[in-house]
Image: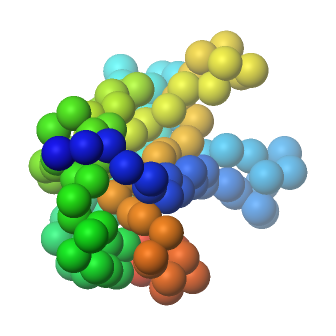
Amino acid sequence: LQAGSGLHLHLSLRDLKSDTPERNIFPDPSDPDGISATGKSFIEGILSHLPGLLSLSLPSVNSFRRVGPGCWTGHSVTWGVEDKEVPLRVCRAAHVGGELNHFEYKLSDATANVYLELATILSA
């Protein structure tokens, strides 16, 4: 396998109805993992639908040539904090004291229809 060009989607969860405009609802400093219940539910939804999402996010035979161990895309149904070998990575933000603040979905490439893919990820 050889690392290739991918399309990594960075997603954050925002509360548009809060007093603080567009407050990020992903981090929870009181939780041992630093992730809110909503964030954990979001992770669980994506991971439970990951096999089905692959048909949209990796739509061609060539898409799968860049997926595997050592290719920074992930190759199993798992997630991790700042782990570049998992398909769903939880990222820290340096500008907000290193708290966990967004997700990176890495099982995608440029042959995918990004609008359809985003819709299915958000629905998951």
Residue 68 drawn at (x, y percent): 17, 47
What percent of the width, then of the height, locates residue 26? Answer: 54, 43
Residue at the far top in the pictured view: 97
91 lies left or right of 67: right
Q: Is residue 48 above or below residue 30?
A: below
Regarding residue 119, the answer to whether it shows in the image is no
Q: Tell me the quarter of the picture where residue 65 sits.
A: bottom left
Spot occupied by residue 111 in the image (x, y as percentages of width and height): 44, 76
Camera sees residue 118: yes
At a point 16% along the width and 38% down the height, the residue shown is 69
Residue name at image x 55 percent, y 42 percent:
102
Up/down of 54 relative to 67, above or below: below
User: Who is closer to the viewer here, 121 or 110?
Assistant: 110
Question: Which of 4 and 46 lies nearest the eye of the viewer?
Answer: 4
User: Is 94 positioned to the left or the right of 18 in the image?
Assistant: left
70, 95: nearer the viewer = 70
* 34 sits to left or right of 21: left
In the image, residue 9 above or below residue 32: below
Residue at x 22%, y 64% (from the top left corner): 64
